[in-house]
Image (tube, rainbow, N blue to C red):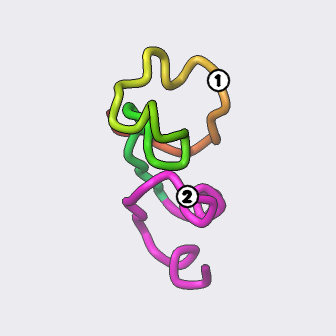
């Protein structure tokens, strides 16, 4: 976490550590546009219809689509 907070730019998946570091550095995270294995086996690999509908965003994070 110390290294992420000291970095000028962070790029990666949407994880708690990436989101926490957004306060201290520019952060770019990949959008989650398909269902993964933790969403249930029947949905895995299928596209999410409205992945950002929840509005659950973190300020200062740039979501890449």
Q: What numbered label is drawn on residue 15?
A: 2
Q: Quadrant of residue 65?
A: top left
In terms of secondary structure, where does tag 2 sit?
A: loop
Mark 2 / mark 1, whichever is N-terminal? 2
Q: Position of residue 44 (x, y in %)?
A: 40, 38
Q: Is residue 57 above or below residue 5?
A: above
For residue 57, above or below residue 1 = above
User: Between residues 17 and 35, which one lies in front from this camera angle?
Assistant: 35
Image-based side of 23 in relation to 6, left or right: right
Q: Is residue 18 magenta?
A: yes
Q: Residue at x 42, y 49 (%)?
A: 29
Residue shown at the point (47%, 55%) measured from the top left: 27
* SS label for mark 1: loop
Residue at image x 54%, y 48%?
Answer: 38
Q: Which residue is mark 1?
A: 55
Residue farthest to the bottom, as pictured = 2
- Front in this rendered view, residue 3 or 36: 36
Q: Position of residue 14 (x, y in %)?
A: 50, 52
In the displayed structure image, the side of residue 30 where residue 16 appears, left or right: right
Q: What x and y, as percent, mark residue 23?
A: 64, 58
Range of the magenta residues?
Answer: 1-25
Q: Dot 2: few (<14), some (14–19), or many (≥20) neighbours within 10 Å?
A: few
Front residue of 29/5: it is: 29
The image shows residue 20, relative to residue 51, as above or below, that is below
Figure disc tally:
2
> From what the image shows, is residue 26 above or below residue 45?
below
């Amino acid at each position: 976490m110390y290294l992420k907070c000291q970095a000028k730019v962070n790029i990666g998946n949407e994880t708690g550590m990436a989101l926490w570091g957004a306060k201290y550095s520019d952060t770019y995270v990949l959008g989650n546009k398909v269902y993964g294995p933790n969403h249930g086996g029947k949905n895995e690999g299928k596209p999410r219809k409205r992945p950002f509908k929840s509005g659950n965003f973190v300020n200062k994070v740039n979501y890449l689509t």
